[in-house]
Amino acid sequence: MNRTDRASRVIAAPPETVYGALLDRESLEAWLPPDGMRGRVERWDPRPGGGFRMVLTYLDSADSPGKTSGATDVVDVGFAELVVPERVVQRAVFEADDPSYAGTMTMTWSLAATGGGTEVTVTATDVPPGIGQADHEAGIASSLANLASYVEGAAG
């Protein structure tokens, strides 16, 4: 498990606003689920050593079988590092019987101020082999697009 997936996007909002959306429960529920899914946070502890548990539900499970059940992905996420307003490092573990989803994936959300706002780069390391790279990168890009819509709408 040494694969790395990444995606990035410039968001028209300052790093502090973007960082805030990464560490707000209601915000995460609104923007983190990629297209075709909705999310619910079951546990929330936004500090280093804390984390959250999110249940992601496929809106149409026929084409996208879940990792945890036919229609859901459940992920436990720990906050490994929080650097305001530059970086959020998460350790994610999927709840799944299939060993191809086992292991701890590290998701690093890096924020860098740019002339147009904030460049957000998401780097996922130790991605479980059961997660297809193209699908995963498309999912990250979708979440970034949702994040952009969410914070740009709030900022404007």
Image (cartoon, rainbow, N blue to C red):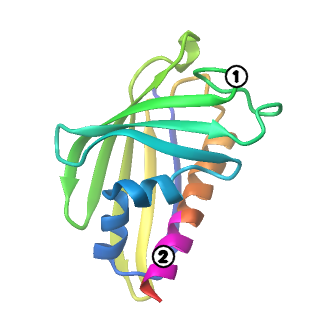
Position above or below: 29 against 52: below
Residue sitting at x 41%, y 82%? 117
Separation of residues labelled 2 and 1 (CA atoms): 34 Å
Inspect this view and state whether residue 51 appears.
Answer: yes
Q: Earlier in the sequence, mark 2 or mark 1?
A: 2
Give whichever of 112, 29 is nearer the camera: 29
Position above or below: 111 against 100: below
In x, y percent, where is residue 131?
Answer: 61, 29
| Mark 2 in CB contact with mark 1 (< 8 angstroms) | no
Position above or below: 87 against 137: below
Mark number for residue 70?
1
Give whichever of 153, 135 is nearer the camera: 153
Q: Secondary structure at mark 1?
A: loop
Which three-letter amino acid code belongs to the residue tagged 1?
A: Gly
In x, y percent, where is residue 23?
Answer: 30, 57
Q: Is residue 150 left or right of residue 93?
A: right
In x, y percent, where is residue 50?
Answer: 21, 39
**Which of label 2 and label 1 is nearer to you?**
1
Q: Secondary structure at mark 2?
A: strand
Which three-letter amino acid code belongs to the residue tagged 2?
A: Ile
In x, y percent, where is residue 156?
Answer: 47, 89
What residue is shown with label 2?
A: 11
Give whichever of 114, 58 is nearer the camera: 58
Residue 130 lies in the magenta stretch? no
Q: Is residue 85 left or right of residue 111?
A: left
Magenta stretch in the rendered image: 147-154
